[in-house]
Image (tube, rainbow, N blue to C red):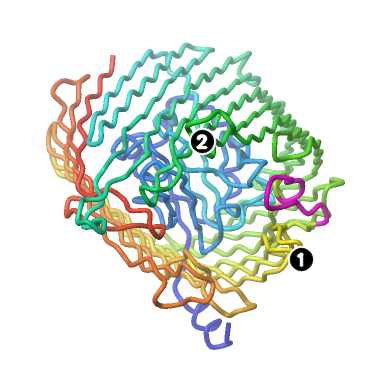
Amino acid sequence: MTLRNLVLLFCMLCSQFVLAQDTIVNKLQEVIVSDIYLKKYSSSQNLIILSDSIINQNKPSLTSLLNYNSTIYFKENGLGMVSSPSFRGTTAQQTAVIWNGININSQLNGQTDFNTISTRNFDNIVVRAGGGSPIYGSSAIGGSIHLNNDLVFNNRILNELQLDYGSFNTLGIHFNSKISANNIVAQLGFSRNSSSNDYDYVGVFDWQGNQRKNLNGEYNNNNWTANFAYKINSNNKLKFYSQTSSVFRNFSLIYESDTKTKYVDESSRNLLEFDGKYNRFTVNIKNAFTYENYQYYGNILNDNFSSGKVESLISKVDFGYKISKSIHLNTVLDYNHSKGFGTSIDNKIREIGSGSLLLTRKLDNWQTELVIRKETTSAYQSPILFSLGNAYRFNSFYELKLNISKNFRIPTYNDLYYSGGGGFGNPNLKPESSYQAEIGNVFSYKKITFSQTAYFIKIEDFISWKPAMNGNWSPVNLKKINTYGLESILNWKYNFYKHYFNINATYAYTISKDLETNKQLYYVPFHKMTGSFGYGFAKAYVNYQFVYNGFVYTLLDNNPKQIVKAYKISNIGIDYNILKSLKVGFQIANILNQKYQSVEGRFMPGRNFNILTNFKF
């Protein structure tokens, strides 16, 4: 990047801000939040908070929610198929997914398939832009997605059942039960999404002129959650979080002659946590067990499959000390023990230990955050990670924020130990590392908030799979990548008598270059834009959504003839409260019946419909 581009980038008005579509915390209620670092050490970075009201207005997949409400770009191999994000021009392996404070990216391939996560059983989902590895560990280079369950002591019983039915025989059943007393909270939930997924490809025909459609695309996604909190006394609390999911998918075909395949993905996450407060001291202890298992059937007509499985034990201890009214210090020790095995992975045990120091200082309108982390393991050499952020509010209209950090991504089990057909892992890999800088401004006036964020990321030792001398593939540390760009976010709310208006919009301009070729990374758009408009009156609410994704290259050489074209998609929905406890809704997706795809040859559906009924009792 030239000096001219650097000067232009850092002279832009930029910022980070907290965009909250709905109030997350009622100050009159005691709320237990498991991810204690999210708010405390994110004041110098951009957060978008999507509350339960926004979650319920979108389709239940995490892909759909974030595609229409954030700057993240998604690649989908068809509706409901494998979905991977690109956050600030990085890869899916460089985007961390955090479940109640625990990193749940796959130990096998280093990423999360966003179409396997149902959003219905979370109280809020937070998008945290920028480097977060010093706090959350591997993969938080481009940013992190936080799936949160907030446990509230409010002496209430609330049950909610939502039923959805839509095009392509798509069915959703979502149930949540929340029971709270003075000293105990229980949350139980179930979510199921299924579809025949046999939609027509808009404007696509075979050589005989017959309408083409999505073949072998059936799926069902089942999620169970159970969360509990017990208040031992005013200073000591015990919490338990559990989530289990089973996802069964056939993989859509590109051509009718392709062999039909399917994929079974099962996972379980369990977290036991203790919180204690003793004058100036605090202690937080987490113990978690996670499990992931996949089975891939190369031909659904027989029972042969390849598989991979990882079991992980995670322990974390956080000691906090309030040095003064404005200065807080945390020391964190954590340990991760993982065991991986399967048909394509040699049985391996990996142990990782780390220590972190976190310091925050808040004085009047100025807050400073410092995080330092060091890992140790026999599998690779880990760098010292750090994050330093400052946020200064000059007045009610203007706030300046700065953040610099060093982040990393560890090699996965596949990278290190894969031994399946066509490739072998490389046990000598180094972790990817990155340096990142952000600078910005946020402007607030009455009900309007506008922000921009400028950033620069330098990634080294990028892990890439390359063909070896014997024809097999193996990963090596090769690429160096520079990513820089601009993110803008607008939020407006207005209430008048029984009328309610809201507008939310995002825009991202992204340059992500491989320094070996000086070419844009494939499947990274230069431009992405989203927008939504909502209007409510009395018992009715109308919502309009819009997303624009610019074209993307599909090859490393940026051949202009090999691209996925830009597309614009609009959705509209209306909800009506028949009774205080009963709501019905109707949604139309892709209302203009646009032909589009985010991955070459993987067409998405045209105009489609969904009806919903929501009961609260």
Q: Is residue 585 left or right of residue 563?
A: left
Position of residue 365 relative to residue 214, above or below, is below
Report the magenta stretch's main SS: loop
Q: Which residue is mark 2?
A: 263
**What residue is drawn where x is 68% and y is 58%?**
407
Could you say which quadrant of the image residue 234 lies in?
top right
Q: Which residue is mark 1?
A: 469
Q: Nearer the viewer, residue 166 or 213?
A: 213
**Per the image, is 420 magenta?**
yes
Q: Nearer the viewer, residue 562 or 585?
A: 562
- Residue 494 appearing in the image: no
Position of residue 69 relative to residue 539, above or below, is below
Disc number at residue 456? Answer: none
The x and y percentages for residue 513 are 56, 74
- Tell which circle, 1 or 2, labels the residue nearer the N-terminal end: 2
- Residue 96 appearing in the image: yes
Position of residue 13 relative to residue 503, above or below, is below
Q: Which residues are magenta?
A: 415-428
Helix, strand or loop under label 1:
loop
**What residue is drawn where x is 75% and y is 34%?**
338
Instruction: Please state which amino acid type lies under the numbered disc 1.
Output: Met
**What residue is drawn where x is 64% and y is 69%?**
458
